[in-house]
Amino acid sequence: EVVLTQSPATLSLSPGERATLSCRASQSVGSYLAWYQQKPGQTPRLLIHDASNRATGIPARFSGSGSGTDFTLTISSLEPEDFAVYSCQQRSIWPPSFGQGTKLEIK
Amino acid sequence: QVQLVQSGAEVKKPGASVKVSCKASGYTFTSYDINWVRQATGQGLEWMGWMNPNSGDTDYVQKFQGRITITRNTSIRTAYMELSSLRSEDTAVYYCARPGFGSGWFDYWGQGTLVTVSS
């Protein structure tokens, strides 16, 4: 099973700042990686798929990069509604797996 | 629009079973896989298993083998996830999720069902 390790566990930033979240896979997953956003009491929302493609309706301030084992989600300028938990997921190697999440909180 | 509507919260005793339903609407039920994912409080998402509603084929994570069964009733466009021999560690929100058109990623999610296992 592929283990996805996300860092940091918690990231404290202010609106307007740039956020950089990391997801590292225990073995190569190619570009088969996605990012989800989850707010308290809500279901996960697909942000980025195939490492760097924004899902429908996702603002351009969200971008993804990486391949193989190292991936990054970048939020260029944080809006108040961006403070949430972000999780990565791979589907390259069965079974699909998720990271433990990074909580992005307001500083 | 695509909707996945799950059954309500459950409270179960250790050793019991729970069956969560996921009713689909807004699309052809047999055209997209249904996946089940759970999330314990304060924990990450955990993929549990998958079903092809057309064929009924299923696959489960090794961790749940022998305890999980995913089924469907195509006439009412509903998928089910049954988990048996419940223990306290199974307390979590259980989600059904479906990929988008031409995508293997989870674009659509049910609202979640809280299952609490407590004596």
Image (cartoon, rainbow, N blue to C red):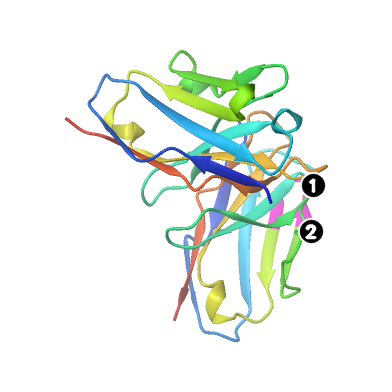
Indicate the amino acid at tag 2: Ser
Residue at 68 percent of width and 69 percent of height: A74
Classify A53 as above or below B50.
below
The quadrant holding residue B49 is: top right
Classify A12 as above or below A70.
below
Quadrant where the C terminus of chain A lies? Answer: bottom left
Name, please, the residue furthest toward the bottom: A16
Say whether residue B69 is visible: yes
Classify B2 as above or below B86.
below
Name, please, the residue furthest toward the top: B66
Closer to the chain start, of discs 1 and 2, is 1
Q: Residues within 10 Å of mark 2 (few under 14, many from 20)?
A: many
Tags 1 and 2 both on a single chain: yes
Quadrant where the N terminus of chain A lies? Answer: top right
Indicate the amino acid at tag 1: Ser
Query: Magenta segment range?
Result: A66-71
Mark 2 secondary-structure assignment: loop
Measure the alpha-carbon separation of dots 1 and 2. 8 Å
Name, please, the residue furthest toward the right: B102
Residue at 63 percent of width and 79 percent of height: A18
| Whole-percent x, y for residue A19 in the image | 61, 74
Instruction: Determine the main secondary structure of the stretch shown in magenta.
Output: strand
Q: Chain of mark 1?
A: A
